[in-house]
Image (cartoon, grey):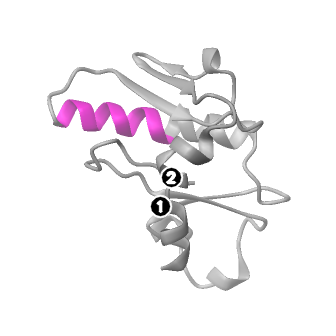
Amino acid sequence: MCFFNASGTQKLHLLVIGKSKNPRALKNIMIQALPVSYTNQKNSYMNKDIFKQWFFDEFGPKVEKHLEEKELPRQALLLIDNAPSHLEVEDLKSGNIKAMFLPANVTSLIQPMDQGVINDLKLK
């Protein structure tokens, strides 16, 4: 999963979901030292538990810190698609940080990550 703010001034580490808790390809590497957030799940797909943990443990605190450093109002809105792995927006609130779903069936047209960002990332 990728994240950045509209101006591109804040980028969070990629969230990588793998099948194995300790992947063989990373046998002699400390996962915590990688420039990604890694978690594992049986089928390596996003689920509600992983998304909830990311939102409250990664997204919320890092956005708060960024806003504080930039001396901006402590409020933010996370725009997400309506994937089944996302919680209801009522459950995605951390202080003045909230989430809102994009309209149905327009994600591929208006979501910035679907406008080539993810594809370019995969190519690199």
User: Could you tell me residue 88's position as x and y percent?
Assistant: 68, 22
Q: What stretch is highlighted in magenta?
A: 58-69
- State yes or no: discs 1 and 2 in contact (Cβ < 8 Å): yes
Per the picture, the main secondary structure of the magenta-coloured stretch is: helix
Residue 2 visible at all: no
Residue 34: x, y in percent? 47, 70
Q: SS of the residue at dot 2?
A: helix
Q: Is residue 51 above or below residue 26?
A: above
Residue 35 visible in this rendered orientation of the protein: yes
Residue at x 72%, y 82% (from the top left corner): 24
Is 41 a magenta residue? no
Label annotation for residue 33: none
Q: Position of residue 66 (x, y in %)?
A: 27, 38
Q: Does residue 84 sit above or below 77 in this rendering?
A: below
Residue 60 is inside the magenta segment? yes
Please, is residue 5 above or below residue 23 in the view?
A: above
Neighbor class of circle 2 (other Cα within 10 Å; few <14, some 14-19, many 20+) is some
Q: Say which residue label 2 marks.
A: 113
Q: In this view, does 59 lie to the left or right of 87?
A: left
Q: Dot 1: few (<14), some (14–19), or many (≥20) neighbours within 10 Å?
A: few
Of 64 and 2, which appears nearest the observer? 2
Lateral position of residue 96 relative to residue 98, left or right:
left
Work out whether residue 31 or residue 66 is closer to the camera in this orientation and state it: 66
Identify the residue shown where x is 71% and y is 71%. Answer: 22
Point 47% across, 61% down: residue: 117
- Residue 67 lies in quadrant: top left
Q: Which amino acid does label 1 sit on?
A: Val
Q: Quadrant of residue 47?
A: top right
From the image, tell me which residue sits under label 1: 117
